[in-house]
Image (cartoon, rainbow, N blue to C red):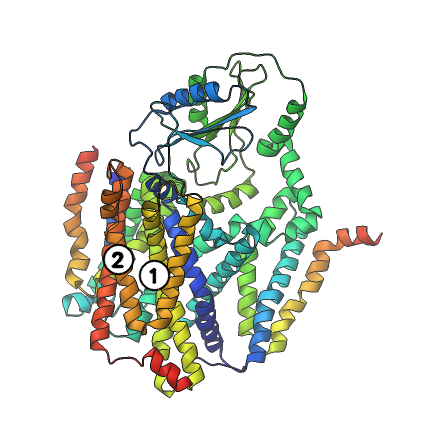
Amino acid sequence: MKQTLTQSMAWLHTWGGLVFGWLLFAIFLTGTLAVFDKELDLWMRPEVPAQKVEQSQALQRALEYLQAKHPQAERWNISLPSERSPTLGVSAGNQRRGGGELLNPQTGEPLAVRETAGGGFFFRFHFTLNMPRTLGIWLVGLAAMAMLVALVSGIVIHKKIFKEFFTFRPGKGQRSWLDGHNASAVLLLPFHLMITYTGLVIFLLIYMPAAVDALYGDREAFGRALRGAPVEQQAGRGGEQGARHERAERPRAAPAPLAALGPLLAEAEQQMGPLAGLSIDHPGRSDARIEVRPILGNRIELTKGRSMLFDGVNGAVLRAPAESRPSQLTQRVMAGLHFAQFGGYPMRWLYFLCGLVSSAMIASGLVLFCVKRRRKYASEAPAARRVSHLIEALNLAAVAGLSLACIGLLWANRLLPVELAQRAAWEVNAFFAVWLLSLLHALWRPTLRGWGEQLGLSALLCMALPLLSLLTLPEPWAQPLHQALELTSLALGMALAGLAWRVYRRQEAAPPLPRRGAVMQEAL
Amino acid sequence: MAIIAPAWWPVVCRILAAIVGGYAFTYACTAALARVLPLPAADAVWVASLPAFALYTLAMLWAFAARSLWRAWWGVALALPLGLLGFWPLLMERLA
Amino acid sequence: MMTSFFAGLLLAYAGMAALCLGMERHFKQVWQHLPSPGQRQALRLAGWALLAGSFAACVLAWGWAMGPVGWLGQVSLGGFLLLMLLPYWPRLAVLLPVFAAPWLGLVGVIQG
C-alpha cells in the first residue's frame, strides 16, 4: 500500500463512507425526524383534544382524578400540557413512564387514545436502531466515529474548499454529484461536526470509560462519588431514591392536606423556566414531598434530572435546582446541543433543515459512489458487476426505501384498526415490512426505474397525508400542530416529487443501463 | 483520484489497527490524561474524556495514512506506556 | 424574537450572497463580466459586515449562549439555499434579499 496521503484518505473516505453511509443515512434521517418527536407523537394520537388549557387548570383536573382513583398510592406522577404537547398524563406508583393514562385536560376524563409507536420510535431508532439497547448504542457510536473519520478525510481530499465554496453545476452527471456532495458538506461543516461529536458525547462515559476506570476503579464508585459530594448538589435522583427507600420502610405518616400547588408551581417556574410536570410522594400525608421538573430546553445544557423539591404540606423549598460543576456542565451543554430542546421552534426548524441537508449530503455521497462505478460496468468482470448491482440496490433501499418506510409508519398509524392488540408493535412491523419490500423492489428493478418509483411513491404518500387524515378522522384538521405537520409533509412530498421527476427524465434521456436480469444471466 | 483496491490482507490489518488499535490507544491516552491533570478527580474525568473522540478520529486516520503497516501499529504500541501511566496506582494496589 | 430571527436569516443569506459575488467566478456567472478589484473588495467587506449583522440579530433573538449556535445554522443554511438557487436563477438568487426585505418589515410591523 504505497500511496500518497491523498490517495489513502480517498480510499478510506470512499469505502468507509459507503459501508457506514447506509447506517449513517438511517441515523441522520430518523434523528432529523426526531427533532419533531412530540409533534409526531401528537399527530399519531389524534384523539387528544385540540383546546389549549392552562397548566394550573389541567393540574387541578389531574389531582381530582388521582384523588378519586388512586388515593392510597405512594406516588403520583403528572405530566402537564406544554407548548409542544397539549397532553395531560397521570400515573400512580413508582414508575415515571409507562402504565400511565392520558386525561382530557379540560374535563379530567380519561381519554381513549390509540396505542401507537409514536414519535418516540424515530427517537429510539436514531440511537439504538431498534436493536437491544447496548448493541444499538455501540453500533451507532461506531457509525458516528466513521462519520468523523469521513468528515476529516473528506476535508483532506477536497483540494478546493474555498475556491468551490459556492460551486454547484447541475446537469453534468458525476461532476454535479461531486459538487453537491462537496458544497453541502463544506457549507454545513460546523453542523456536521457538531452534531456528530455531541452525539458521541451524550454517551461519553459509556463509549470511553477510561478516565473513570483509571481514577475510580469501577463505574459504580464514580456514580456514588458524583451523587455523594454535597457541593455538587448532584443529590437529585440517586439521593432522593435512597431517601424514599428509607421512608417507605417507616410506618405510614399521619394524614395531612396537600399544600396549595399554585404558588409552588409559580416559584418553580420562576427559578427553572416553563414546567414539564411534577410528582408527589405520599400524597395526603404529613411526609408528602413534591418534586417539580422543568421542560428540557430552558437553557442549552441538557437538564435531565433537574428538579426542585418542596415539602408537600407547608410548601417549603427542600432542595433548590442543582447547578452542574463547570466540567460536567461542558458535557451537558454538548449533549444539549445535540438534543436541540433550546431556542424554541425557530431553533428546532434550523436543526431540522440542517439535518435534512446532512442526510442529503450522505445520500449524495452514496449515489456518487455508484455514479463513478457505473462508467466501468461494461468492462467489469461478472462477479464485480454483481457486487456493483448489489451496492446500487442497497443504496436505493437505504435512501429512498427508508424514506418510504418513515412515511409508511405514519400511514400505518392511521390505517391499522384502532382496537388492534399490540398496535404499537404492528406499526413498527409495518415500518420494517415497507423497508424490506423496498429492498426486494430495489433488487428486482433496474436502478433508475427503482429510484423513480420509490421516490415517486414516497412523494405521493407524503403529499397525500392531509387527505389520509380527512378520510380516517372525524375532525381531521382541528389541531394546529396537525396542520403544521401535514403542511411540512406536503412540502417534503413536493421536494421528493421533484427528485422523482428528475430521475424519470434522466432515465428517458440516458441510454438504458444493463438490466439486472441480463447481468445475472451473464454471470451465470 | 483512482480507487485503489489493494489485496485484502493489508486492508484488514489497517482496519483492525484503526478500530481496535485506535481504541486501545485512545483508552490509554484518556486514562493517562485523567491521571496527570492537576484537577479534582470528578473534574479530571470529564476534562480527560471529552476530547477522546477527536483523539480516536486522529488515531484511525493515522492507521490508514501511515506509510507502512508497521508504522500503523507503532502508534498502537504507545498504548502500553500510556496505560501504565494511567493505571499504575490501581496496578500497585492489585500487586500489593 | 421572530423579527430578529428572520432578520438574522435574511442578513446571513445576504452576507453569503455578497461573499459569493466577491469571487470572480460567481460574479461572472451572475453579471457576465468580471468585477473590478475595488468591487470585489467592497463585496467581501459588505459580506462580512452582513454576517456580523446576522450575528447581532441572532444574539438579539436568543441571547449570548444560544445566539451563536443559531447563527452558525443560519449562515450554513443561507449558503446552502444560495448554492441551490445560483445555477438555476443566478440574478434572482443574489437579489433575493432585496425582494425579501419588505416582507421582513411586514413581519416586524405585525409582531410589533
Screen quadrant of the N terminus of chain A: bottom right
Task: Kindly tell me whether residue C110 is visible in this rendering.
Answer: yes
* Of the pair C21 and A190, the residue shown nearer to us: A190
* B75 relative to C30 in the view: left or right: right
Q: Residue A192: where, in percent of width, then height?
A: 41, 57
Q: Write the residue at 50% across / 22% down.
A: A70
> Image height check: is A184 above or below A316?
below
Q: Tell me whether the residue at label 2 lies in contact with that at label 1, contact meaning CB atoms closer than 8 angstroms.
A: no
A462 vs B41, nearest the viewer: A462
Q: Tag 1 or tag 2, which sits nearer the N-term?
A: 1
Chain to which mark 1 belongs: A
Q: Are marks 2 and 1 on the same chain?
A: yes
Q: Quadrant of the C terminus of chain A?
A: bottom left
Determine the chain carrying the residue at label 2.
A
Q: Closer to the camera, A303 or A136?
A: A136
Q: Quadrant of residue A238?
A: top right
Q: Quadrant of residue A41?
A: top left
Gap between marks 2 and 1 measured at Cα = 16 Å
Tag on residue A281?
Answer: none
Q: Which residue is mark 1?
A: A360
- Residue receiving disc 2: A459
Label 2 secondary element = helix
Q: Secondary structure at mark 1?
A: helix
**Residue C82 appears anywhere in the view:** no
Residue A452, how many percent across, how many down? 27, 67
- The location of residue A506, given as percent across then percent down, is 23, 73
- In depth, the one of A322 and A516 nearer the eye is A516
